[in-house]
Amino acid sequence: MPAPLLVPSLLASDHADLAAGARLAGSLGLPWVHVDIMDGHFVPNLTFGPQTVAALRRRDAAQFLDVHLMLDAPQKFIEAFAKAGASLITVHTEPPHDIAATLARVRALGCQCGLALNPGTPAEAAEPFLAQVDLVLAMTVQPGFGGQSFRRDVLPKISQLAAWRRERGLKFRLEVDGGVDLVTGPECRAAGADTFVMGTAFFGAKDPAAVARATAAW
Ligand code: DX5
Ligand code: ZN
């Protein structure tokens, strides 16, 4: 299992100064930041677009931009986010698109690819694609908003995905997103997760450096 990786989610940072949030992550030795893209259809909220990703990329050529597409038609926007400088693009299993083709397109455009599951979507929805992805994202809240409560009922799905990874000798990262904090993160770690998106519990913390230190020990 890879070492634990804390991934601050810019959704919980100051949207008028996203670069400051991204810099804070970098200054604490955290190489990834998570960028939530919402379209008001797949989820009932709006956030950022390709121009936001491009602007973050201009500020830091090296930062790993983990772009989470919560879109009804992700295949239409892959190219724009890849050109904007995304490092990894995650699409959901739930909207109607040819998942294998979308993932292949992400890779052909030079990005790593990820596949996300809503809390109510079974692990089996991702199973046919596990050998094709760099990351599987198990949502631990219903996507759309930061600051929601962690869903413990997702833990068995994380264990199942981790078991498949082990048994099949696969290498994908297992990421969790939603309600992750210093209590729920270790529960995800025990279930087999290695990549921890954290919005509120990181940017809302009095001492984000202490959060980063604590996470490194999970
Ligand atoms: C929710 C987003 C998350 C969000 C998590 O739909 O996908 O990435 O930023 O925020 P917290 O950590 O506050 O639950
Ligand atoms: Zn997210």
Image (cartoon, rainbow, N blue to C red):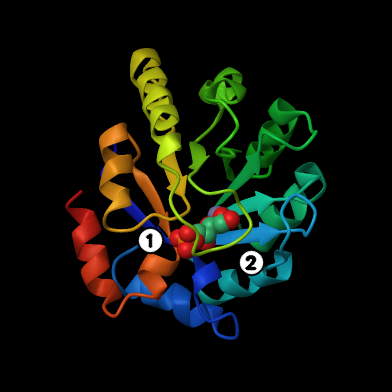
Q: Which residue is mark 2?
A: 53
Crowding near the residue tagged with mark 2, few <14, some 14–19, many ≥20 C-alpha atoms within 10 Å: many
Q: Position of residue 196 (x, y in %)?
A: 38, 51
Residue 194 is labelled as none
Q: Residue at x 49, y 39 (%)?
A: 138
Sooner in the amino-acid sequence: mark 1 or mark 2: 1
Q: Secondary structure at mark 2?
A: helix
Q: Is residue 134 visible?
A: yes
Q: Hey, which quadrant is residue 117 in on the image?
A: top right
Ligand 2 is in which quadrant of the figure? bottom right
Residue 72 position within the rendered picture, expressed as x and y whole percent measured from the top left: 79, 46
Is residue 114 placed above or below 204 in the rendered structure? above
Q: Residue at x 59, y 80 (%)?
A: 15
Which quadrant of the figure contains the N terminus?
A: top left
Q: Is residue 33 visible?
A: no
The residue sitting at 57% across, 61% down in the picture is 35
Q: Amino acid at mark 2?
A: Val
Dot 1: element: loop
Amino acid type at image mark 1: Pro
Residue sitting at x 24%, y 56%? 215
Residue 86, position in %: x, y? 60, 56
- Horizontal arrangement in the rendering, residue 198 relative to residue 15 (left or right): left
Please state which of residues 43 and 80 is positioned toward the viewer in this rendering: 43
> Which residue lies under the disc numbered 1?
31
* Vertical arrangement, residue 101 with respect to residue 166, above or below: below
Residue furthest toward the bottom?
Answer: 16
Q: Nearer the viewer, residue 48 or 203?
A: 203
| Above or below for 165 versus 197 | above
